[in-house]
Image: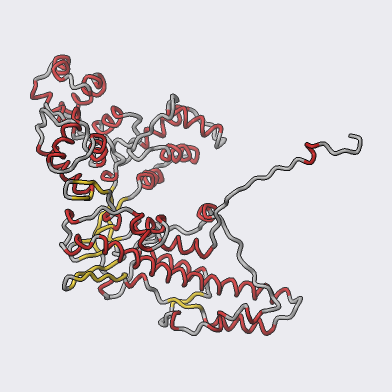
Amino acid sequence: MDGKLSWNMLKQNQQLKLLQKISPQQIQFIKLLQVPTATLEQRIKEELEKNPALEDGQMNYADEPRNEYEDLDRKDEEEPKEELPDTGLEDYLAHDAYDYRTHLPSGGSSDEDDFEAPVVQLQSLYDQLLEQLHMLDLSEHEFMIGEHIIGNIDEDGYLRARGSMDPLKAIASYLAFRQNVSTTVEEVRMVLEKIQGFDPAGVGARDLRECLLLQLRRKEQTPTVELAIEVLTHFFDELTRKHFSRLRSRLGISEAQFKEVYALITRLNPKPGDSQAIIKHEYIIPDFLLTVENGKINIRLNSRNAPELKVSRSYLDMYTEYKSKFKKGDTKTKETLDFVKQKLEAAQWFIDAIRQRQFTLLNTMEKIAEKQEEFFLSGGDERRLRPMILKDIADEIKMDISTVSRVANSKYVQTDFGIYPLKFFFTEGIETEDGMVSNREVKRALQEIIDAESKRKPLSDDKIALELKARGYNIARRTVAKYREQLNVPVARLRKEV
């Protein structure tokens, strides 16, 4: 190359990447923030077992002299402070060993904060199906197939096709090419049939017809049930198009018999994965206690949110003792010092995270109560709810929306008129002639209109929009459709009765 370097050899590429890193302390706070009071005790117990430098004591660490621990690094000037490397949030969560879905505390004091109320808790469809899968006598190979099938069942409870490929073929192909698990479509079908026998009835169906048939086949096979199965098997299209006269003629049955069949089919659940189908009853512990006295709202945290934790005095003394004995080159003592120091720092981080959790929880709940003051002062009148979104509270407490979301998730407030999940207070706003109202109020009005309609001539979304407008709620037809779907109300055609 005649002593010259080519341009390609000198060419350099620069890439600017923005990577979000978060410290272990921040990660600990984030994870503790999303833990409800009901599982905080278990989480603290795990930390106490894991870290001997953390103690459960009568004296709160806030009342304990801190100078001895705070000066650990200053006493060790010849030894540079060893900082823990920052960890990416997603990497940390992926390798986290803690599971916050634990049992509720079994013990408790006689304090009023130990109040527990029977509340309906939602269990994820995936968890419920996986529990039932474990109960089957399956080979390891079949269990792997079943686990993958369950992972592909959507929130409505269906195993739907993705693209043009049949879901069974898609699962067999995925297992073969991505998991190196050799299987056939027939094996996948056999496992799916077992899953289709799980609760809730109809789960694992590949379309609406199969979903309804799965439910009918579990019922006692009466003449009406058998007729309903025949309708869904051979005349599903006619049924969905409401060709009732043609159906009665082809089945050779009377109008009364057809009404029984139709009533039976319409009572089936078209969305078995819907949360209403998979509820379980548990006792929950409210995270906040809200009372109203003389027109003033008072809020306090459940006392279980304020555990008495402190850094172990014996570990502090141990650090001081080994520090005084340490000599340069003494590897064994250095390793001990590093271990004790790491445990002390971890204990302090955990205590600080608990404190920060307490402050953030209380600050957030106070702002929610401030925004929804009329609701609480009225004794729970939903018409008094103000439109409020996560950003409204985030702006007030000067924290990120994701932080408010973590506080609102799985947290409850106990009032004199009931227990409410915090998510209850976050609603969209709809503009009316009298100002902004909560979409919860609009949904109630929409439900009233549908309940009062003639079932022989159900109202279309356009007509419902006109009815709402007459009541002062000026919303578009597409908004009516959205709210109707959120209320699990079918379209007018499917609400029609014989």
Residue 152 seen in the current view? yes
Q: Is residue 33 above or below residue 329?
A: above
Q: Is residue 59 left or right of residue 80?
A: left
Front in this rendered view, residue 417 or 367: 367
Q: Quadrant of residue 489?
A: top left
Front in this rendered view, residue 51 or 437: 437
Q: Residue 264 location in percent, x, y?
A: 17, 31
Name which residue lies at 39% across and 33% down.
192
Please state, as top left, top right, bottom left or bottom right, where the C terminus lies in the image: top left
Please state, as top left, top right, bottom left or bottom right, where the N terminus lies in the image: top right
Front in this rendered view, residue 158 or 254: 158
Q: Is residue 28 above or below residue 109?
A: above
- Count of numbered circles on the image: 0
Q: Is residue 331 left or right of residue 359?
A: right
Name which residue lies at 15% across and 62% down.
378
Q: Residue 381 location in percent, x, y?
A: 16, 57
Residue 410 seen in the current view? no
Name which residue lies at 24% across and 71% down.
298
Q: Quadrant of residue 161?
A: top left
Q: Residue 81 location in percent, x, y?
A: 65, 72
Front in this rendered view, residue 125 or 342: 342
Q: Is residue 290 left or right of residue 49?
A: left
Name which residue lies at 58% across and 60% down.
86
Q: Farthest residue in the right direction?
A: 2
